[in-house]
Image: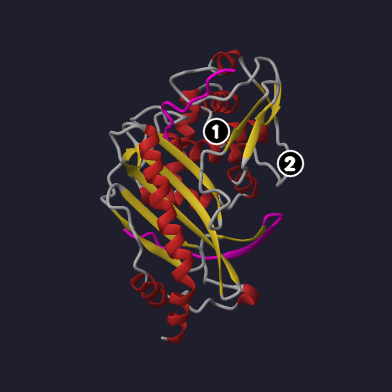
Amino acid sequence: MPNFRAAARRSLLVPLSAALALATGMGTWYALDGGGPLTGPGGAAPAAGSASGVAAVARSLHLPWPAEGQASVEVEGIGSLGTRGEQRPVPIASVTKVMTAYVILKGHPMRPGAPGAAVTADEQAANESYSSVETTAPVLAGRTYTQRRVLELMMVPSGNNIARMLARWDAGDEKAFVAKMNEEAARLGMGNTTYTGVSGMETSTRSTSADQLRLARAAMKDPAFREIVATRTVEAPGAGVTFRNTNKLLGRDGVIGLKTGSSTPAGGNLVWAATQEVAGTPRLILGVVLHQRAGTTPAEGSAAAHEASRALITEIRATLPDALGRGQGA
């Protein structure tokens, strides 16, 4: 069996604007509508939705921020819980693929549960399927796959060859697709982000935790994207190989996504999404942890990013409901 080891797996306070209840087959979600007042079920404003309420909640939480790198966290419908670490652009490894998927889905929208467009694997993607120096997923040249399946093969095991194949499928070549990525970054206000490739292999692709949080917020509005990043396992058709999601937190402590990335220069990186019910209302918590144990092995960096993220998620889910309750009583 081919070796699919992940030898080079590449992965300010940001105010929240508004919340819009959105029902999908995966449960109740809160997505940003880009403006207007914060509203909850029945149009009622959440108690901690005001600026003073958000500040009170943020002050009352003593979060276990990672001691190195940078991190940002926010709760939809409530606001930012803060950012730690110098917001200087750093390599983000395979976290890059969040933007790759975002651009693909913007150009080729998919309904929830639908297969999407047909994608025929090219010779280059097939030839790059079996690599000992980067993370890949096997495809067969000339075989047609669903858009959903190839997005899963890119996001779940973090297939670099799939990211490059999707870029060529969408834009004709990778350079043109990277230009689209940077255009979207600018549109989203990601002023400290530069994309130079589609997979994250390039250390010149750099960003910050605050910028990646902006992207995560935008990407999670798409029900198809949410389904893909919540996928536990994916099979490569015709190859007899099943991959587990590289996000080891998925399915625990309310975690429903999002994307890992690790390499020696980038360290360990994890963009995550989790849910927590607060006063009967489901809340989506988004977080980004970057540049953990940079300069060590990808495995060590990845483990550090997972641990730092797990600590944040556990503390927020445990203390947020009581913190909001205190805010209501203020």
Per the picture, the main secondary structure of the magenta-coloured stretch is loop
Coloring applied to the structure? secondary structure
**Residue carrying label 1:** 157
- Mark in the foreground, 2 or 1: 1
Callout 1 secondary element: loop
Q: Where does the image place residue 287, in percent across and percent down from the top left?
A: 44, 54
**Residue 194 seen anywhere in this rendered image of the structure:** no
Q: Quadrant of the N terminus?
A: top right
Could you tell which of marks 2 and 1 lies nearer the N-terminus?
A: 2
Q: Where does the image place residue 220, in percent across and percent down from the top left?
A: 56, 51
Q: Quadrant of the C terminus?
A: bottom left
The residue most toward the bottom is: 329
Q: What's under tag 2, amino acid-wise?
A: Ala
Label 2 packing within 10 angstroms: few (<14), some (14-19), many (20+): few
Q: Residue at x 45, y 60 (%)?
A: 314
Image: magenta residue range: 1-26
**Residue 76 seen anywhere in this rendered image of the structure:** yes
**Would you say 316 lies left or right of 275 here?**
left
Residue 18 vertical placement versus 181 (above, below)? below
Q: Is residue 4 magenta?
A: yes
**Residue carrying label 2:** 114
Residue 283 vertical placement versus 246 (above, below)? below
Q: What's under tag 1, amino acid-wise?
A: Pro
Label 1 packing within 10 angstroms: few (<14), some (14-19), many (20+): many
Q: Where does the image place residue 203, in percent across and percent down from the top left?
A: 34, 30
**Would you say 82 lies left or right of 257 here?**
left
Residue 81 vertical placement versus 106 (above, below)? below
Is residue 228 or residue 319 the one in the foreground?
Answer: 319
